[in-house]
Image (cartoon, helix red, strand yellow):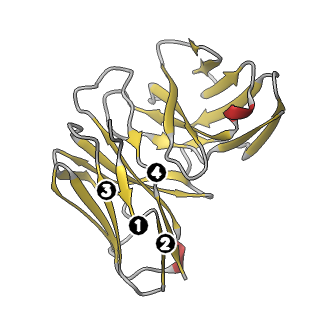
Amino acid sequence: DQQVKQNSPSLSVQEGRISILNCDYTNSMFDYFLWYKKYPAEGPTFLISISSIKDKNEDGRFTVFLNKSAKHLSLHIVPSQPGDSAVYFCAAAFSGTYKYIFGTGTRLKVLA
Amino acid sequence: DAGVIQSPRHEVTEMGQEVTLRCKPISGHNSLFWYRQTMMRGLELLIYFNNNVPIDDSGMPEDRFSAKMPNASFSTLKIQPSEPRDSAVYFCASRPDGDKTFGNTIYFGEGSWLTVV
């Protein structure tokens, strides 16, 4: 039973355009969400996070949006660059706990 | 600073053999995690240690899997006997306990790619 779902296994975007990666979750008690990026043959690295008290968090070209009523979050990358090509995992957690529930990942390919 | 160090990076073994994966967490990190990545299930938490003590092993698939953390700088994940369905990437990750704000993040190693034939 997947509590965190990334329904798009892959996404291709032209360089300079916006990339939108989506994530849905089922447990309304989650109050902390993260995005990790993973390059081939490397471990996932932390990208950006958001707590449930916010609906938006921005860090440079990366913005995460949280829609609690829809149990949905999204990661926007603007503008997309070829170096952003990677697998992106979203994760949800109860703040202050150790257990992060990860999605299955979305492979983003940014075309030059 | 050295990150989380895992070995071996790649392992190919025959079904029925014992496999041992090793991890050295980041110095000073109190929490250690073992994750498994598969296409179908993404990143699954197998076991969580805090201060060398196993706290949650509910993600360990079955008795063939075991994990130990004899000291703060070393952990092992053992599969005995291994089966083809165990083929996956196994990640070790660590996190400092003091970081309990919303900036809480875990730091992953590069993974151990296991293939059981």
What residue do we see at 75% from left, 27% from top? A19
Residue type indicated by callout 4: Glu
Discs 3 and 4 share one subunit: yes
Separation (CA) of disc 3 from disc 4: 10 Å
Residue type indicated by callout 3: Cys
Separation (CA) of disc 1 from disc 3: 19 Å
- Chain where mark 4 sits: B
Mark 1 or mark 2: name the one nearer the start of the chain: 1
Contact, mark 1 vs mark 2 (Cβ under 8 Å): yes
Q: Which residue is mark 2?
A: B86
Discs 1 and 2 share one subunit: yes
What residue do we see at 75% from left, 25% from top? A80
Q: Which residue is mark 4?
A: B110
Q: Which residue is mark 3?
A: B23
Discs 2 and 4 share one subunit: yes
Mark 1 secondary-structure assignment: loop
